[in-house]
Image (cartoon, helix red, strand yellow):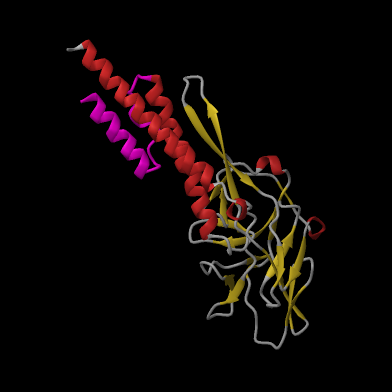
Amino acid sequence: MKRLYIALIIMLFATNSLYSWEDFQEIQDPGVRTTLDGLHAYIVHYQNWLFYTINTHTPGYIETGVYNTRTVEGNTEIRPFFRWRAGPVIETGRDLDFYLDAASRGFFAVQMPTSLAYTRDGRFILDSQRRMVTMSGNYPLLGENGHIYLPEGESISVSRAGLIYVDGEPIDRMKIVVFKRKSDMTYDNIESLNGSFFVLTREIETISGPQYYLIKQGMLEENNVLKAITGDIGMAKNSYDATVKTAHMINKALGTAASIANP
């Protein structure tokens, strides 16, 4: 029965990364516990790689790294972190595409249904009310006066400080949020919604003023992920397979020991 139970746990880890060691506290064997922790860690790495691949062409997508650390209890704890480095900059020529240069600490502020969110995806369009919204999700871009509505006109231009003009007439300035310290931009303070949009879980000190950022019209910051290009999927898959084999060997050894103890 014990061997069957352990095999079932291995299968659960193989199909669902939401399981962690805390779900199986009754397992006392340190070898089984270590292999289960290892399976979970490699599944997280593998899922991250899948997300990177899916979002290869998503502007403003931010890579998430993972540390594996040992706890006092001897378990493996997975600690994620953001890699905020800037992605490659491309020229699109679109009037409502913007690249935000703020030392990787700046974001466009957008209004989601229940909260304020931040993004480096600078693709915007006009909705039916001629309100500037994100191309992904249609979330309103915020300006100093709230939502930004653009009147009919022949030309749209944006200054490097984020001031929007239609036919030479100033409309509003984009609300740009720049966090003061990159050390505050952690998983404890910021939650990723999909890799491109982020919300705060606690207040972070910000700095304001166009002297802290630069906006370029007709350009975008691309995905900043390197692993989708260089790839570590082979390492994750091979390590996972090796850990599964180790788990099965331990499982078999436990069964043999149980048989000898109870002939």
* Placement of 116 over or under 19, stated as above or below: below
- Horizontal and vertical percent for residue 77? 50, 31
Q: Is residue 259 above or below residue 45?
A: above
Quadrant location of the C terminus? top left
| Residue 148 falls within the magenta-colored stretch | no
Left or right: where does residue 51 sit relative to residue 256? right
The image quadrant that residue 150 belongs to is bottom right
Q: Residue 242 versus residue 208: which sits nearer the camera?
A: 242
Seen at 27% across and 35% down, the residue is: 8
For the question of whether residue 125 can be seen, the reply is: yes
Q: Which residues are magenta?
A: 1-29
The residue nearer to you, when weighing 21 against 251, is: 251
Magenta stretch: residue 20 in it? yes
Where does residue 75 sit, x and y in percent of width and height? 46, 25
Main secondary structure type of the part rendered in magenta: helix
At x 76%, y 68%, the residue is 216
Q: Quadrant of the N terminus?
A: top left
Query: How many numbered markers are drawn?
Result: 0
